[in-house]
Image (cartoon, rainbow, N blue to C red):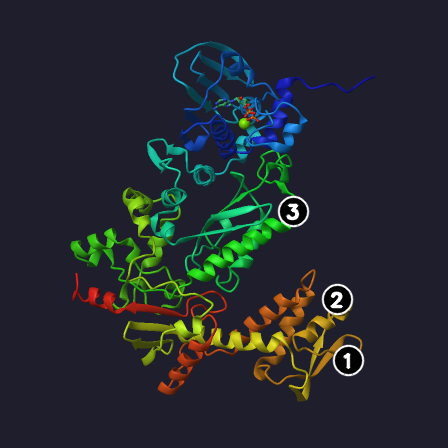
Amino acid sequence: MDIIKVMDEPLANKIAAGEVVERPASIVKELIENSIDAGSTTIEITLEEAGLTSIRITDNGKGMTTTDAVRAFERHATSKIDNEHDLFRIRTLGFRGEALASIAAVSKVHLWTSDGVSGTEVDIEGGKVMNHRAASLRQGTDITVSQVFFNTPARLKYMKTIQTELGHTIDLVNRLAISHPDIAFRLAHGQQLLLKTSGSGNLQRVLSDVYGITVAKKMIPFQAENSDYKVSGYVTLPEMTRASKNYMTVLVNGRWVKSYAVNKAVLEALHTYLPIGRFPIIVLRAEADPYLTDVNVHPSKQYIKVSKEGELLAAVREGVHAAVKKAIIVPDAIVKEKKKTITPSVQESFWKHPERRAEPVQSFQTTSNYPPRQQPSWTVGEQSSREDSTIDPDGQAQTVEASETANADEEFVSFGSQEEVAKPLDHSEPKSSFPKLLPVGQVHGTYIVAQNEDGFYMIDQHAAQERIKYEYFRTKIAEVDHEERQMLLMPLIFHYSADEQLKIEERLDALEDVGIFLEQFGPSSYTVKEYPSWFPAAEASSIIEEMIEQVLHTRQVNIAKLREDTAIMMSCKKSIKANHHLTMEDMNRLLDDLGKSENPYTCPHGRPVLIHFTTYELEKMFKRVM
Ligand code: ADP
Ligand code: MG
């Protein structure tokens, strides 16, 4: 008996919907992409209950004819490609002709559209066009998707809380707004306005709408180009970071895509500038001939394939690295008054000059020994909560930011040009530009206070020493001198399992390159009888163990990276920790050594080493100037 049947269309659509329509955010994505493809300049999104009750998208794009309005909901119905050659030169966001059919299969849809010649209204239920009729003529499309997943109960059950679903949609709309600065977006949840962009075409302005002006002002432009790719965008200076990669946006030919490889290249470009486990806020736009990209590898088109990936990644690394290196500055500490304790006039000037706020220096928050409300006035406390809240478009702080953005354009003109903001220092000549600092004393056995004619400085002594040691070990390890070895009275012994030994055997050369000389010792052990004389003796055993671990657990040993990691590990172990008393002489020496280092401004983990209070800022704090 024959048992194979071809599915009817509603069933096939429902199955296809499984791939495309995962959650309300994926519906919003497809609908906005359609509006973008239709050439809209304004797109309004209104959600009820995070979109589960309804999603309404209104655009002013080219609209559809009556026939197209009905046909659009059939599977494989598209106006965007004609033949298979078109697949290699896709310039639109959509092309699969599946989204509307899939969405209609799992929800109720009301469409109103007009191409300026005719107006049409269509009702669709369970994927079937129930009726259509003539309607008013105002060019554009207005589509309402309601009762999402009403006929797919399992999917509905899988939905997380309203907050989670809403979070996904906000994130999505943020990214689409960032990818299209020339389109005015408006996202509302019920009565609550969540995002509004102007459509002015200014990316920095959109970044300000999305992340808040404080973040936007901290973002520096970058760009690089080779024969295949053009890369550009904005990235936050290393001192403004986030705990996740969620703030890294990659756009390829205007399409927001997820790319592990590009993210990795960005992180490589920021290596040693970023604290461990922290990520930048970045928007990276890559442009290439569409023929180099294959967007047809994933139903939601979020993953794409690119030819000549190496060229793309090289441009990413080059652009980001050069820009950040050039812009590294001494973090300036600037008055950050607590809202409740300051007089209105100070508050006002503070809001007028947001660029004069304290830099969001992480070490301030993490190393502070004070409970939040008892910080002495000269430490610039409490900036953390605000900085972070501006990022997530969920709370009141966002609303406050929104009011600031009114002046955003004007502010951007003076971006970084305030005379009181420390001048960007070029990395190529850091030694001469590092200020001469005279120590005044030490605070809490942790920070050195120093001064010169430009104001005063606080130096994190641990971070400073890490930087100095790191540069020392990095030079030493770059070329291990075999003459410079030291014999041990008591050899060190390390034990490994048989499979581990196999790997170690393969990697003995790499280990020797960083000064570790292993000799087989019995069936399951190695000994180390000597090591370079500059190895930190007290920690030698644990350092060697960690380095062996490292070569054991990487798929392919990268010598440059191994050297780098070893230098960081050694600098960290050997450095003076907090709560360590230093004499004036110690401090002088430390500051001298710091001045000689190649990059005295951040520790190898990317944390700031020093913070500068300018003379002007001091005068301002004490109201000697207004
Ligand atoms: P695709 O975008 O892959 O072509 P969709 O199912 O998303 O497939 O949409 C089908 C077609 O409906 C599109 O090709 C387009 O012609 C039309 N369409 C959908 N949304 C809009 C819109 N907002 N404005 C104008 N035309 C639209
Ligand atoms: Mg589409």
Q: Which picture quadrant has residue 17?
A: top right
Disc 3 and disc 1 in contact, CB within 8 angstroms: no
Give the mark, 3 or 1, whose residue is nearer the N terminus: 3
Badge 1: residue crowd in 10 Å (few <14, some 14–19, many ≥20): few
Helix, strand or loop status at disc 2? helix
Q: Is residue 67 above or below residue 236?
A: above
Residue nearest the viewer, comparing 321 with 257: 321
- Residue annotated with mark 1: 521
Tag of residue 308: 3
Residue at 64 percent of width and 71 percent of height: 547
Residue nearest the viewer, comparing 140 with 89: 89
| Viewer-nearest of discs 2 and 3 | 3
Badge 2: residue crowd in 10 Å (few <14, some 14–19, many ≥20): some
Residue closest to the far right = 1
User: Could you tell me if residue 265 is visible in this image?
Assistant: yes
Q: Is residue 327 above or below residue 482?
A: above
- Residue annotated with mark 2: 503
| Amino acid at circle 1 | Phe
Q: Position of residue 232 (x, y in %)?
A: 49, 48
Q: Position of residue 32 (x, y in %)?
A: 47, 30
| Amino acid at circle 3 | Lys
Q: Is residue 408 above or below residue 156?
A: below
Badge 3: residue crowd in 10 Å (few <14, some 14–19, many ≥20): few
